Image (cartoon, helix red, strand yellow):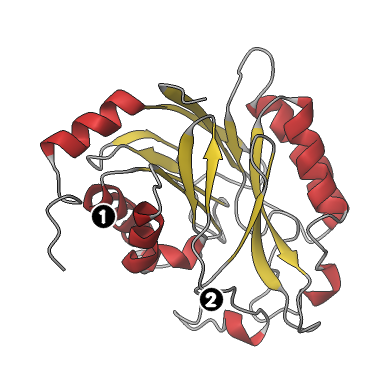
Amino acid sequence: MTTPTLRLALVQAASALDPAVNRDALGRLAAEAAGPDTPADLVVFPEAFARDFGPAGSDVSADAEPVDGPFGTAVAQAAAAHATTVVAGMFERGPDPERPYNTLLVRGAAEASYRKVHLYDSFGYRESDRLTAGPLEPVVVDVRGWKVGLMTCYDLRFPELARALVDRGAELLVLPAAWVAGPGKVRHWRTLLAARAIENTVYVAAVGQPADRYSGHSMVLDPFGEVVAEAGPGSPEHPEVVRAVVERAALEEARRVNPSLANRRM
């Protein structure tokens, strides 16, 4: 069934180092994001919500799980309890027991897993020392007739992944992140999100963990790159839900006015 709108709830919240604490938080925050008074079709949590990265270079393998483990079960239960679809980040056991995948889980109206392709070997970090990159296969899911493409954090800096998702039909790009804070990082975040929206004429919904360690500023942008809704930097003590409604009429109008996808020659 194709719907003219899709109600989004982005949960800007910090994850802890204790997976049990994060599972409890996910259930509580999902109820707030998609409760009877505030229904949502798609609820998105940040990257690494099952267990925070910890200090730079930390070994996270002990807390890696299969996708149907305790965290995956909690995500599925939250989606079922609130008749919604939930996206949340975790560390997934893979073929290398010391270097798990950085994985997004989708549970609810759609079920999928996306393993982060571009690991954060930048700005002095070496994510590939502790994690394994996922396969080079873009993941698009159907949520109430909307084609939703999945990206994670550092993937944002690689326009070819966004374009590959759009070439597979994506109308909304969803990007959970733990965008590390630093000089100019919020400017990079906002600029790159707008660029991905404009160049692909798609909606973009990006949710990050909050300041001070990360950058916050979770937001939804329309296919013209205009900000529909945005949080501030936030704090670990005060989770925030950013709400927006994406509209098919606006998507179609953007692609009529700016038919850049149709005009490609390369």
Residue 168: image location, x then y, percent: 40, 54
Instruction: State the residue in front, 66 or 217.
Output: 66
Q: Is residue 188 visible?
A: yes
Q: Is residue 233 above or below residue 264?
A: above
Image side of residue 142 versus residue 13, left or right:
left
Callout 2 secondary element: loop
Residue 244: image location, x then y, percent: 44, 28
**Split into 4 quadrants, where in the image is the C terminus?**
bottom left
* 2 and 1 marks in contact (CB < 8 Å): no
Mark earlier in primary sequence (2, 1): 2
Number of the label disc, if any, that sits on residue 96:
none
Number of the label disc, if any, that sits on residue 195:
1
Image side of residue 255 versus residue 265, left or right:
right
Image side of residue 35 versus residue 66, left or right:
left
Instruction: State the residue in front, 91 or 95.
Output: 95
Residue that sits furthest to the bottom in the current view: 129
Callout 1 secondary element: helix
Q: What residue is at 27 percent from the left and 40 percent from the top? A: 223
Q: What residue is at 63 percent from the left and 38 percent from the top? A: 239
Number of the label disc, if any, that sits on residue 119:
2
Which residue type carries mark 1? Ala
Dot 1: within a 10 Å radius of its alpha carbon, few (fewer than 14), some, or many (20 or more) residues?
A: some
Residue 233: image location, x then y, percent: 48, 47
Q: Is residue 196 above or below residue 125?
A: above
Dot 2: within a 10 Å radius of its alpha carbon, few (fewer than 14), some, or many (20 or more) residues?
A: many
Which residue type carries mark 2? Leu
Q: What is the CA distance from the residue labelled 2 to the residue labelled 1?
A: 21 Å
Residue 126: image location, x then y, percent: 56, 84
Q: Is residue 85 above or below residue 17?
A: above
Q: What residue is at 61 percent from the left and 19 percent from the top? A: 39
Q: Is residue 25 visible?
A: no
